[in-house]
Amino acid sequence: MEPIHLFEKAEFSAESFIPKQLHIGEAGAAVLLCFEPGQAMPLHPHPGAVEVILYGLEGEGTLAVGDEEKPFKKGDLLFCKGEVPIGPKNTGRTRFMVLVVLVLKKLFSQG
């Protein structure tokens, strides 16, 4: 397996945020979310995941987690359960990138 260069995978659009699928395996998945200023992803859960890990790669915005909205920026790391709805939004003046890693339930049902 070769390393994935995240910043080379980044893709942006003026129309909508771009979710770039980086990996889907039996135990986990990774997606790079790319937002222009003002763009947002609707609040949604990940029912196939035991845990969702979000890491701020670039820029700043907010992250809705369940009923709360928290500031989220480059260098921030957040863990939440898969059934908790999340929704990132770029509230900054520059591009916003978030890496999302899903720990899938399949990993636990096999063991």
Image: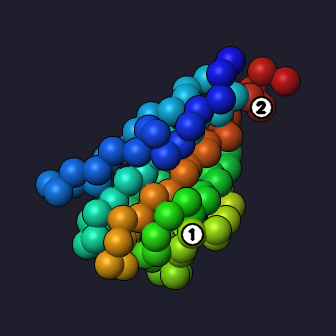
How far apart are the two marked residues, 1 and 2, measured between alpha carbons? 31 Å
User: Which residue is depicted at the point 54% across and 51% down?
Assistant: 99
Task: Identify the residue position indicated by label 2 in the image.
Answer: 108
Counting from the top left corner in percent of width and height, residue 40 is at 31, 65
User: Which residue is depicted at the point 36% across and 79% down?
Assistant: 92
Picture colour scheme: rainbow
Q: Amino acid at mark 2?
A: Phe
Q: Local crowd at mark 1 within 10 Å, few (<14), some, or many (≥20)?
A: some
Secondary structure under tag 2 reads: helix
Q: Residue furthest left?
A: 15
Counting from the top left corner in percent of width and height, residue 82 is at 59, 51
Looking at the image, residue 37 lies above or below residue 103: below
Give the quadrant of the N terminus.
Answer: top right
User: Which residue is depicted at the point 62% across and 52% down?
Assistant: 52
Counting from the top left corner in percent of width and height, residue 34 is at 38, 53
- Left or right of 30? Residue 13 is left
Q: Residue furthest top?
A: 1
Is there CB contact under 8 Å for labels 1 and 2? no
- Left or right of 29? Residue 50 is right
Task: Identify the residue position indicated by label 1 in the image.
Answer: 74
Q: Which residue is nearer to you in this view: 32 or 6? A: 6
State the image quarter where residue 105 is shown: top right
Residue 22 visible to the viewer? yes
Which of the numbered marks, if any, corresponds to residue 25? none
- Left or right of 27? Residue 47 is left
Residue 47 visible to the viewer? no
Counting from the top left corner in percent of width and height, residue 31 is at 49, 42
User: Which residue is depicted at the point 36% across and 65% down?
Assistant: 95
Q: Which residue is nearer to you in this view: 111 or 56? A: 56
Question: In front of the other: label 1 or label 2?
Answer: 1
Looking at the image, residue 23 lies above or below residue 13: above
Give the quadrant of the C terminus.
Answer: top right
